Amino acid sequence: MRQRTRHLRSRSTVTWAYPIAVALIGMSAQAATPDTQQRHFQFRYELTVRDVPAATKRIAVWLPVPIDNAAQRVLDVTVSAPVDGTYLTESTYGNRVWYADFDRPEGTDFSITQSVEVVRHELVASRLSVGDKESSATPAPARRFLSANRLVPLSKRFASIARRVTRDQVAPLDRSRSLYTHVLGHMAYDKSGTKWGQGDAIYACDFGKGNCTDFHSYFIALSRSADIPARFHIGFSIPQGRGTGTVGGYHCWAEFWTAGAGWIPVDISEADKHPEKADYFFGAIDENRIAYSLGRDLVLPKRTNAPPLNYFVYPYVEVDGKPWDDVDRRFTYEDISDHTGTARKP
């Protein structure tokens, strides 16, 4: 039986478990209903910091921690590490962080493992039919997602593209659908070259290719330039087939706001890879994912005199105050199922 304590020691390993918190920013039209799919699984996030110099005095590690939101219920999180750590909250969006600051351990390498038990629901925007109803004002929690980010600027160019793309549309939902269709037609999922994966909206606009960060940064830039709040989520896709396996890397998606329907999800890069589901991914995202953080240009707690992170899904490590990139990562999952292969309801 698993012991859930704040601080459980086992030999040289410290295991931390924290009480799950809910961080909801603004209202949402997204709903989990008896008709939506759900998935109950364990996600394992492992990192090994390599080749730490012998002269190192201090090491700091920041690790993202998933939290409850409209689509997922986090049942348990533990972090096993050779050092003590603490859970902190990033101040702008409420993202959770596991943080440790410590003397160099013995040897040149050390490992940290995070294990998450989560129930993830398919998200379907349940009020798309009233998405054309506008209210007098956008609430403050949504208005913050009208501001620019470093790689998602507001510009006359983006505003001009948005006006052209939506020129025949009046209803907010229809305008967003036109922007979604434009990005889907303009972009191709293509990881050739060196500039993809930064979530650079200008690069995406200029070259029309990239990965999920580039698709959704372009969409968010157009939306915000058209005065439509839009926000960025990042986490991991879980292979659709149930069982166990590995996850290659991160995945991201976006949401936009309408006063009639609240936050509505889109996954344009998945729509590009699966054209037969293009209609589905406007207003819905599947249950085969886990969200880790929200937003861009993140200022991590305890990280002083350093520029914000572009986005936060992989561990961030500093050695004597300087970024350390020699970090191996491995992600795996295991579905928690009953004898029929159906995810159990916890």
Image (cartoon, grey):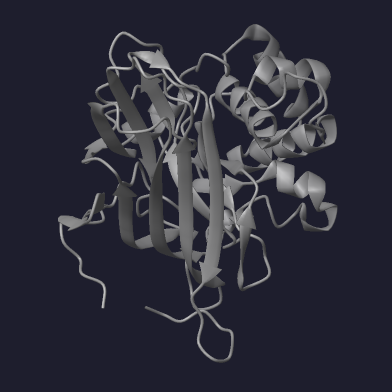
Above or below: residue 95 compared with residue 146: below
Above or below: residue 220 compared with residue 94: above
Q: Position of residue 281 (x, y in %)?
A: 68, 52
Going by the image, does 241 lie left or right of 128?
right
Nearer to the camera, 106 or 113: 106
Q: Which residue in the rendered view is the most extreme toward the bottom?
A: 339
Q: Quadrant of residue 288?
A: bottom right
Q: Position of residue 312 (x, y in %)?
A: 46, 32
Task: Please state, as top left, top right, bottom left or bottom right, where the N terminus lies in the image.
Answer: bottom left
Residue in the picture at 82% in, 19% down: 207
Residue 256 visible in image: no
Q: Position of residue 163 (x, y in %)?
A: 70, 21
Above or below: residue 124 compared with residue 203: below
Q: Position of residue 284 (x, y in %)?
A: 61, 56
Total count of labels? 0
Nearer to the camera, 250 or 266: 250
Q: Quadrant of residue 228?
A: top right
Nearer to the camera, 129 or 156: 156
Residue in the picture at 40% in, 50% down: 113
Residue in the picture at 51% in, 81% down: 337
Residue in the picture at 31% in, 38% down: 97
Above or below: residue 10 compared with residue 310: below
Task: Please state, as top left, top right, bottom left or bottom right, where the C terminus lies in the image.
Answer: bottom left
Residue 108 visible in image: yes
Going by the image, does 30 lie left or right of 63?
right
